Image: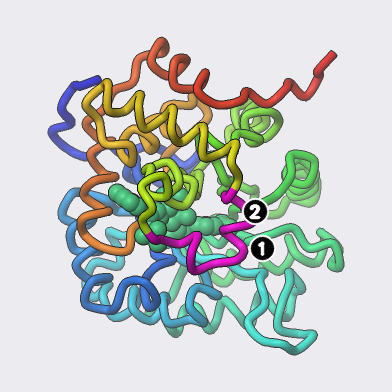
Amino acid sequence: MDGKVEAMDYVSVGRTGLRVSRVCLGTMTFGKESDEEVSRAIMDHAWNLGINFFDTANVYNKGLTEEIVGRWIGDKREALVLASKVHFPTGDGPLERGCSRRHILLEVEKSLRRLKTDWLDILYLHHWDDNVALDETLNAVDTLVRQGKVMYCGVSNFTAWQLMKAIDFAAFRNLMPIVCMQPMYNLIKRQAEVELFPLAQSEHVAVFPYNPLAAGVLTGKYLRGELGRLDESEMYRERYKNPVYAEVAQRFVEYAAAHHCSPASLALAWAASHPAVTAPIVGARNMEQLTDGLKFLDIGLTAEQRAEISALSVEPPLATDR
Ligand SMILES: NC(=O)c1ccc[n+]([C@@H]2O[C@H](COP(=O)([O-])OP(=O)(O)OC[C@H]3O[C@@H](n4cnc5c(N)ncnc54)[C@H](OP(=O)(O)O)[C@@H]3O)[C@@H](O)[C@H]2O)c1
């Protein structure tokens, strides 16, 4: 499991000309678990390693995350690939959510102001919206692209049928194509392997997985009684606090120790090693976590090692299970 990476590698986002580092920096902790000083140190470190791809969202810490990133960017903007998102509620009102034309256009304006930039490189629809016609949503994104405020369109947390519908709809109406997706993916949650990843490979959609460490569960910290996100977030407890997942984490941590890897770096390496995956999104609350996770850049997993690690969890049944 070695093969030292001397310099950052860059990969294409689907069939676009956009070239991003083979790891994306997540910013969700900025303004909450990480204060501005720590957030800036994290961004500096990532940038100095050649990570040119940062992921944020309009809703992260009520806009504070985007403000912190915006204050950091300075003269790096043209060399930085910046992604943000829209969908989740920004307030309690009925208009302050979703993928309506109105909400998308107003929220992107706010994101641009917070980020102190004229454009987003990627705008993700953060979630499918059952209450809005796809026609309205994709036309709103297309408007932003034609205005030069958004360069490329991605989706997150879509099912495969929703994504395929959106891809075909955009092609049929000659709207901006969907070039990337952001699914949840880690050794514990492998649903994306069943339908989303084959779809991504078939349609040349780039894949940027979030939660590659299962929100920290795969580091083994909860087995050792340490505190973390699961103690702070009900949503994450529901997603990951499960004795079956703890058993996977136990087997995984033992495997990592036997192979002289930190669990965080091996979990990222495993997520990155699926052939459909373009680049995982790394998330950290401090420099120690960041540097630990980024050791994955030095890990070259063989197909056999990927198979051994995959066997530590439950393989999801095929879509055509019979
Ligand atoms: N599209 C979406 O719906 C969506 C959803 C979630 C995230 N994202 C994006 O994806 C990025 C990454 O997601 P994520 O943060 O959930 O990824 P993750 O890698 O699954 O979890 C990262 C968290 O694990 C813990 N951790 C990290 N390294 C550790 C280490 N070495 N030892 C112990 N604990 C460690 C930290 O949490 P604690 O210290 O608090 O335990 C850290 O915040 C986010 O920043 C965001 O940009 C997108």
Q: Residue furthest bottom?
A: 93
- Front residue of 78/305: it is 305
Whether residue 81 appears in this view of the structure is no
| Residue at the image position 33 percent from the left and 20 percent from the top | 301
- Looking at the rendered image, the quarter that the C terminus falls into is top right
Q: Is mark 1 within 8 Å of ligand 1?
A: no
Dot 2 corresponds to which residue?
Answer: 176
Q: Position of residue 267 (x, y in %)?
A: 39, 36
Q: Is residue 152 above or below residue 256?
A: below
Give the mark nearest the N terminus, 1 or 2.
1
Percent x, y of residue 225? 38, 53
Residue at 63% x, 36% y: name it: 192
Amino acid type at image mark 2: Met
Indicate the secondary structure of the residue bearing disc 2. Answer: loop
Range of the magenta residues? 227-241
Q: Quadrant of the N terminus?
A: top left
Taking the image as shown, residue 128 lies to the left or right of residue 258, namely right
Ligand 1 shows up in which quadrant of the image?
bottom left
Q: Is residue 160 left or right of residue 15?
A: right
Q: Is residue 233 magenta?
A: yes
Separation of residues labelled 1 and 2 (CA atoms): 6 Å
Give the overall secondary structure of the magenta segment. helix
The response on whether ligand 1 sits within 8 Å of label 2 is: no
Can the viewer see residue 56 in this picture?
yes
Asked if residue 84 is positioned above or below residue 108 in the image, the reply reads above
Residue 234 covered by magenta stretch: yes
Residue 142 is labelled as 1
Residue type, label 1: Asp
For label 2, the crowd category at 10 Å Cα-Cα, with few meaning under 14, some 14 to 19 and many 20 or more, is: many
